[in-house]
């Protein structure tokens, strides 16, 4: 039993080992070693594993470039040009290799690869095993790590991230990606339930997921629950009164449970002792507050981060910087010690989400190219996939969920663009899209 679970967790199924190891490295190994064992250099393994995996697929003959894949190449080309011509300083160029160049070039390669030997069932089994193992890590982080003195704040919810890694300095954790993964697995299980029912292990996984996400995060739970329901639904469900009614009940319970969970977790600091109404009012004020910068914590709100870029660059800055950016990783808060970085010497995280990071680093041109890349990915997830089997339908539901997350996470999270775990999530869409092409040829 234990040996079987370990094989499922690491992804050692026959014909699936390379892909399984890639997912295990990025969803489990890197976060555990990087944060729990305090070895930050391990995060480079994410980019290394991505380029090794894409190179492996090319080596075994799975690479098939077509003209229609050129649209995926525009953003990687721009990233390379930005690194060469617009990014100053050797240190920034080196960091850009991990955060920008390797991921963008690797995903271009993966967009043209056929995943011939990958079973959708193997992905489902491994992801379910990874979702279950989050439980002990989340409990440890909630009851011990978040309350200890190793974090910079009295209570830092970024450390509630399972095996996905957290920043012990406070802030910059990977909890948004962790929550997205748990809901991804929930989506796949619910789709399986609608198609063919589920077993005891599926039920255990659902319970585990609901407990862990309630502990880890709340602000985005209701929206992700909507994405789950959209991903598992069919066009005919619009006229299914039972499905719509049950969906509304689930959404209301998720919203209510998330609010209570987040409120009750604030046992220290300024949020402690708030009623539900006071908490909701404070939550709204945090997003709409005219006081842009919190100088006590160095934090800048997500909406206010966009306002800062508009006032400092779009209206008062140089046109070249507006269009082309200040250079790769230049706005990264952890690079504020590098003289060439635009964040140099600042004590605030002014690029607090993926959108503002890209606006500062690659400018409007880079943002538009990235949006084009993502929209092509999203469109493919919804309209270019022929679901030929139950396993493929289950994976397709997960791919649609990830695609929907891409509509929100750029303005919600500031680690999603450079997180190895997030990049591994994107691989789901490419596997599905290219497998679908293969199935069409076989039929």
Image: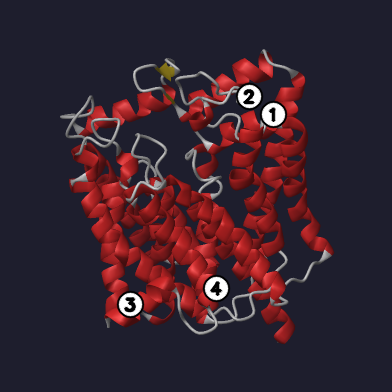
| Label 1 to label 2: alpha-carbon separation | 6 Å
| Label 4 to label 3: alpha-carbon separation | 18 Å
- Seen in the image, is 109 located left or right of residue 178? right
Q: In which quarter of the image is residue 327?
A: top right
Nearer the observer, disc 3 or disc 2?
2
Q: In which quarter of the image is residue 240?
A: bottom left
**Residue closer to the observer: 296 or 343:** 343
**Residue closer to the observer: 389 or 367:** 367
| Label 2 to label 4: alpha-carbon separation | 39 Å
Asked whether disc 1 touches disc 2, contact meaning CB atoms under 8 Å apart, the reply is yes
Q: Which of marks 2 and 4 is nearer the N terminus?
A: 4
The quadrant in which the C terminus is found is bottom right
Q: How many discs appear?
A: 4
Q: Residue 332 carries which label?
A: none
Q: Earlier in the sequence, mark 3 or mark 2?
A: 3
**Position of 233 relative to 117 (above/below):** above
**Position of 233 relative to 61 (above/below):** above
| Label 3 to label 1: alpha-carbon separation | 48 Å
Asked whether disc 3 touches disc 2, contact meaning CB atoms under 8 Å apart, the reply is no
Report the residue marked by disc 3.
5
Report the residue marked by disc 4.
18
| Label 3 to label 2: alpha-carbon separation | 48 Å
Q: Residue 340 carries which label?
A: 2
**Position of 207 relative to 269 (above/below):** below
Q: Which mark is residue 88?
A: 1
The answer to whether residue 328 shows anywhere in this view is no
- Give coordinates of residue 342: x percent, y percent: 60, 23
Under tag 1, what secondary structure? loop
**Residue closer to the observer: 154 or 413:** 154
Q: Earlier in the sequence, mark 1 or mark 2?
A: 1
Q: Which of marks 4 and 3 is nearer the N terminus?
A: 3
């Amino acid at each position: 039993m234990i040996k079987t679970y370990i094989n499922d967790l690491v992804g050692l199924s026959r014909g699936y080992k390379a892909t399984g190891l890639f997912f295990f490295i990025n969803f489990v190994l890197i976060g555990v070693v990087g944060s729990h064992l305090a070895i930050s250099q391990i995060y480079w393994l994410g980019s290394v594993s991505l380029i090794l995996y894409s190179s492996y697929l090319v080596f075994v003959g799975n690479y098939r470039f077509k003209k229609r894949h050129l649209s995926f190449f525009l953003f990687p080309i721009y990233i390379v040009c930005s690194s060469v011509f617009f990014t100053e300083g050797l240190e920034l160029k080196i960091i850009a290799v991990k955060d920008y160049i390797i991921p963008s070039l690797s995903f271009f390669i993966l967009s043209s690869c056929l995943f011939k030997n990958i079973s959708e069932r193997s992905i489902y089994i491994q992801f379910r095993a990874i979702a279950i193992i989050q439980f002990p890590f989340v409990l440890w982080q909630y009851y011990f790590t978040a309350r200890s003195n190793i974090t910079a704040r009295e209570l830092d919810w970024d450390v509630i991230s399972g095996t996905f890694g957290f920043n012990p300095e406070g802030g910059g954790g990977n909890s948004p990606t962790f929550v997205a993964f748990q809901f991804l697995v929930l989506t796949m299980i619910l789709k399986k339930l609608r198609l063919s029912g589920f077993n005891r292990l599926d039920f255990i996984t659902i319970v585990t997921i609901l407990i862990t996400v309630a502990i880890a995060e709340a602000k985005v739970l209701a929206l992700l629950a909507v994405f789950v329901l959209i991903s598992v639904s069919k066009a005919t469900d619009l006229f299914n009164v039972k499905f719509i009614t049950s969906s509304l009940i689930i959404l209301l319970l998720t919203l209510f449970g998330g609010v209570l969970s987040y409120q009750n977790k604030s046992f220290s600091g300024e949020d402690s002792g708030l009623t539900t109404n006071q908490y909701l009012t404070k939550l709204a004020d945090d997003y709409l507050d005219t006081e842009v910068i919190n100088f006590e914590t160095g934090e800048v709100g997500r909406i206010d981060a966009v306002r800062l870029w508009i006032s400092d660059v779009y209206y008062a800055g140089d046109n070249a910087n507006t269009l082309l950016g200040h250079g790769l990783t230049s706005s990264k808060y952890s690079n504020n010690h590098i003289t060439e970085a635009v964040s140099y010497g600042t004590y605030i995280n002014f690029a607090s989400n993926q959108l503002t990071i890209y606006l500062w680093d690659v400018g409007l041109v880079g943002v538009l190219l990235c949006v084009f890349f993502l929209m092509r990915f999203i469109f493919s997830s919804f309209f270019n996939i022929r679901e030929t089997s139950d396993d493929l339908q289950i994976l397709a539901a997960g791919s649609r969920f990830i695609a929907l997350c891409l509509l929100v996470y750029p303005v919600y999270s500031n680690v999603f663009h450079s997180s190895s775990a997030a990049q591994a999530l994107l691989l789901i869409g490419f596997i599905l899209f290219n497998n679908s092409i293969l199935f069409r040829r076989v039929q």
